[in-house]
Amino acid sequence: MSDWEVTELEGQLDKLYSEMSELAGQGKKVVEEAEQVKVVHAAKLKEAEKSEIVASRSSPGIAENDTNVGNEPPVEKTFEEDMETVVAVCGAHDGEMVNCACGIPCAKRHSWTRENPGRMFEACKKYDHDTGERGCNTFKWLDEDQTEWQREVINTLLGERHKMETELTIIKARLACVEDLKNLARGMQSRMVRLWDASGSTLLRLVNSEMECCEAWDEVVPGAWPATGFPVAATFFGLLSCLFGLSIGGLGHLFL
């Protein structure tokens, strides 16, 4: 091998080391980004749990403790709309339109208070949900009054539904955090694979050159290398490849 070929290989080796150093820096950056993602999602998760706790305490239609259902004092003329409130214009039982005294058609809604959970009523659209003011005083229940047992069962079911919705919100936040970490890991693996492919040819040329030198030296001085049947340079290359492959797989296993 000529001097200029040796110099060229040394330059390629220096470039390979530089690329590996750059890859190590990228790996450190990915770890820092992953830590930042964990911190952000932990804050979001904590905020979601806090908001759900506040909502559960402030909801007039769900008891904080199931043992107290039905023992609260009745709340007169206070109604809370459910998200599935029927906003269509309602009519009388005989099919005729029902209008408020102000001329606006009445709306069919649901009450979700502890005293009347799930009951349907029709009232003027102007009634105030928060104060219980009935607008133009047009109001009528559309179903029969509930017994104590019915109110207790419905409130218990509403409480269970609220718990499941809270758990679902927390699970979604955690899944979003895991998915972001997976995306970071995939990006890191792609960069490492591209770098390995680009530097593979350089390593192969270097190893072939070293093997030629070893074989030439072994011809000059028989028995100079251990009689293993495998050149030292190839052994070094195999160990390097193994360690580098383990580093890629280790990062993938860590995040995925």
Image (tube, grey):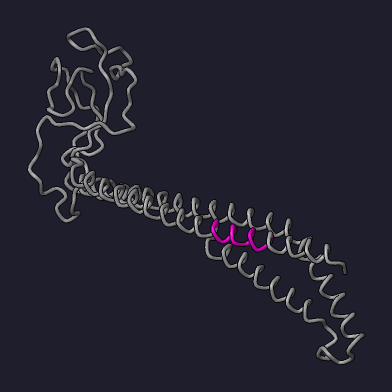
Q: Total of numbered circles in the picture?
A: 0
109, above or below 249, in the image: above
Residue at (74, 75) in percent of width and height: 238
Residue extending farthest top: 103
Image quadrant of residue 105? top left
Residue 4 lies in magenta, yes or no? no
Image quadrant of residue 67? bottom left
Taken as a whole, is the magenta stretch helix, strand or loop? helix
User: In the rendered image, which quarter contains the N terminus?
Assistant: bottom right
| Horizontal side, residue 204 vs residue 73: left or right | right
Image quadrant of residue 87? top left
Along the line of sight, which residue is nearer the eye, 83 or 245? 245
Along the line of sight, which residue is nearer the eye, 236 or 108? 236
Residue extending farthest right: 219
Magenta span of residues: 16-26
User: In the rendered image, which quarter contains the C terminus?
Assistant: bottom right
Residue extending farthest front: 3
Residue at (87, 75) in percent of width and height: 212
Along the line of sight, which residue is nearer the eye, 102 or 238? 238
Measured from the top left, where is residue 151 in percent x and y? 20, 44
Measured from the top left, where is residue 196 in percent x and y? 70, 60
